[in-house]
């Protein structure tokens, strides 16, 4: 175990509220549009929950031109040591990087730009205590992953490239870190064997979308529509904060994707 601060302890976060255009956000299926009011209220509750656990939240302006820009986890990666401006794999999201870059430069002494021409979405990156896992997916390719490894080396972070199950949007669609030693995941991702060395808690069948939870400080945010997962985590001693995700779920999103989180200064 490294002696760095726990990777799920945060005191700063960046968020971006949805615009009305969120109704046209990307989604894999042909499902219903989410309602703007519903997404805005889920986002507001999420931001309040971050504040409740002691996080100072910086709110960036709404970007109507980018329907998916509420999912601010995807265009950048942040660590106490510095930030990395990524290159999202969806063409309609490419411009989100230039929009977030000024905030990264305001808050981090070191900001690295992903070199080369490959693609990486932040949703494919799982930061664990000792390594950063980079999931290959339809949004993150090998060239992008190799370029990211070089940036992570500059920040002193070891990393590993892994596969995302077919037809799963992002690596973290199917997993989240619960603590240094434990991962919440789906049975389909667990079967691939990527979490050797971790204890795994598998979300019950039918609650696969609960796997995109978010450990923040002493609590775990979990989608309120997943009672069996909530019960399982509570039985294991986790302090669960249930948050509504039914509208953002219509556009393939969960609880990690609506913020960038880091620890500034000494905890
Ligand atoms: C997209 O397809 O890019 C968005 N509709 C959902 C992104 C979710 N991002 C994440 O989980 N990191």
Image (cartoon, grey):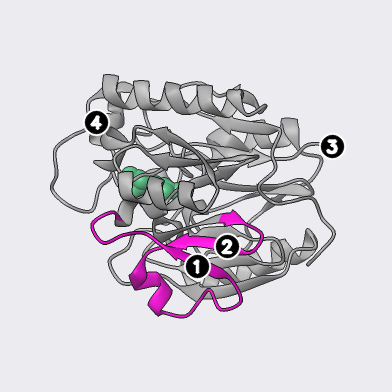
- Residue designated by label 1: 200
Judge whether 133 appears above or below 231 on screen. below
Query: Is 249 displayed left or right of 74 in the figure?
Result: left
Work out whether mark 2 precedes mark 4 in sequence or the reverse, and give the earlier one.
Answer: 4
Task: Using the numbered discs, state the Cα–Cα distance from disc 3 to disc 1 in whole angstroms.
Answer: 31 Å
Work out whether mark 4 precedes mark 1 in sequence or the reverse, and give the earlier one.
Answer: 4
Q: Are marks 2 and 4 in contact (CB under 8 Å)?
A: no
Q: Are marks 3 and 2 in contact (CB under 8 Å)?
A: no
Instruction: Specify the segment rendered in magenta.
Output: 178-207
Tell me where residue 128 appears, x and y as whole percent.
Answer: 64, 61
- The kind of secondary structure element at disc 2 is strand
- Residue 208 visible (yes or no): yes
- Residue designated by label 2: 182
Dot 4 surroundings within 10 Å: few (below 14), some, or many (20 or more)?
many
Q: Nearer the viewer, residue 183 or 23?
A: 183
- The kind of secondary structure element at disc 3 is loop
Tell me where residue 166 appears, x and y as whole percent.
Answer: 30, 72
Tell me where residue 169 appears, x and y as whole percent.
Answer: 34, 58
- Report which quarter residue 189 is drawn in: bottom left
- Residue designated by label 3: 265
């Amino acid at each position: 175990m490294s002696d760095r601060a726990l990777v799920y302890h945060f005191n700063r976060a960046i968020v971006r509220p949805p615009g009305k255009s969120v109704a046209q956000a990307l989604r894999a299926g042909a499902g219903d549009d989410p309602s703007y009011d519903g997404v805005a209220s889920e986002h507001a509750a999420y931001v309040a929950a971050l504040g409740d656990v002691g996080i100072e939240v910086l709110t960036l302006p709404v970007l109507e031109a980018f329907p998916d820009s509420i999912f601010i986890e995807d265009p950048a990666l942040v660590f106490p040591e510095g930030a990395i401006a990524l290159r999202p794999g969806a063409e309609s999201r490419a411009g989100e990087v230039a929009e977030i870059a000024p905030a990264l430069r305001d808050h981090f002494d070191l900001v690295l730009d992903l070199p080369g021409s490959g693609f990486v979405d932040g949703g494919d990156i799982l930061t664990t205590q000792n390594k950063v896992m980079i999931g290959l997916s339809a949004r993150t390719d090998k060239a992008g992953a190799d370029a990211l490894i070089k940036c992570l080396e500059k920040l002193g972070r070891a990393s590993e490239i892994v596969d995302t199950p077919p037809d799963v949007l992002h690596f973290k669609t199917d997993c989240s870190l619960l603590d240094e030693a434990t991962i919440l995941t789906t049975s389909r991702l667990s079967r691939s064997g990527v979490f050797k060395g971790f204890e795994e808690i598998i979300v019950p069948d039918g609650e696969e979308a609960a796997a995109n939870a978010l450990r923040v400080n002493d609590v775990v945010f979990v989608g309120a529509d997943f009672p069996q997962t909530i019960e399982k985590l509570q039985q294991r001693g986790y302090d669960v904060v249930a948050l509504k995700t039914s509208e953002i779920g219509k556009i393939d999103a969960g609880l990690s994707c609506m913020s960038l989180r880091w620890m500034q200064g000494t905890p």
